[in-house]
Image (cartoon, rainbow, N blue to C red):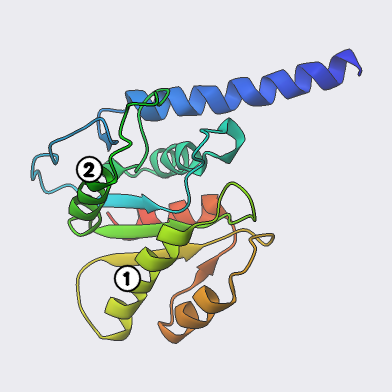
Amino acid sequence: MSTDHVSQYLQSRRERLTLLEAMWNDPKVQMYNDVELPPKDGSPSVFLNGPTSRHQILELNHRCLSVYHLRTAGFTGWIFAPEPRGQEESDDFTERDYIHKWESSRRFSASCNSFWIPRDGNELLGLNSNLELGIDLGKVLSGIEGQKVFVGWPDDAMRMGLPSHYRQLADLPLYRNLWVMCEQIALQMK
């Protein structure tokens, strides 16, 4: 293995770690560690739906990229990232009841639900994401006013046929690029 190859690999991990640290330190990003809802300050809010790496695989953390892209695009509101801040220990946040209550309280109070679903067959199945996307698409299809919904997944996302069908019925654009989706969220949530 060449020295250049090793350097490139390490640099890419440093960049992702820097984004992860920025997300953890952002005072307007709420994560599982934050028990109370943020104050009602009139700021828009975005809930970052999508599959989570249960093994906290750095390369699979799409939320730190979303936070970076949203902030770069000028979004200054609250961001809800459903994952732990810091390394998850075996006794942290494993109670599903806590996670379900945390997520539902923020999903239903957010101004916007964004879905980035980089589904693969192993680590990022997105089974909960399917249900949550179905709830939001059902609200859109029923004409229920409220939250904005943004939907995206990369070209290589697996088994997206049914979500794609219902997204089309709801007449929502499909974003194939996370940066472009975050930029549109920031523009529409001002």
Provide the residue designation for mark 1: 136
- In this rendering, is residue 27 above or below 65? above
**The C terminus sits in image quarter:** bottom left
Frontmost residue, 178 versus 51: 51
In the rendering, at what x and y percent does residue 33 appear?
A: 25, 30
Image position of 25 with respect to 52: above or below: above
- The residue lying toward the viewer, choosing from 188 and 109, is 109
The residue drawn where x is 16% and y is 34% is 35
Give the class, few, some or many, for how many residues have Cα within 10 Å of label 1's Cα (few <14, many ≥20).
many
Measured as percent of width and height from the top left, residue 17 is found at 53, 23
* Foreground tag (2 vs 1): 2
Q: Residue at x 58, y 54 (%)?
A: 118
Q: Quick one: SS at disc 1?
A: helix
Left or right: where 157 falls relative to 175: right
Q: Residue furthest top?
A: 3
Q: Which mark is residue 158?
A: none
Position of 85 with respect to 108 (left or right) is right
Is the N terminus in the top left, top right, bottom left or bottom right quadrant?
Answer: top right
In-image side of 82 versus 106 (left or right): right
Residue at 76% across, 22% down: 8
| Location of residue 68 (image quadrant) | top left
| Residue occupied by mark 2 | 98
Q: Mark 2 or mark 1: which comes first in sequence?
A: 2
Q: Quadrant of residue 172?
A: bottom left
| Residue 68 visible | yes
Task: Determine whether 89 is above or below 71 in the image.
Answer: above
Q: Position of residue 151 (x, y in %)?
A: 46, 65
Q: CA distance from mark 2 to mark 1?
A: 21 Å
Q: Residues within 10 Å of mark 2 (few under 14, many from 20)?
A: few
Residue 180, image x, y percentages: 52, 55
Residues under numbered marks 2 and 1 in contact, where contact means CB atoms less than 8 Å apart: no
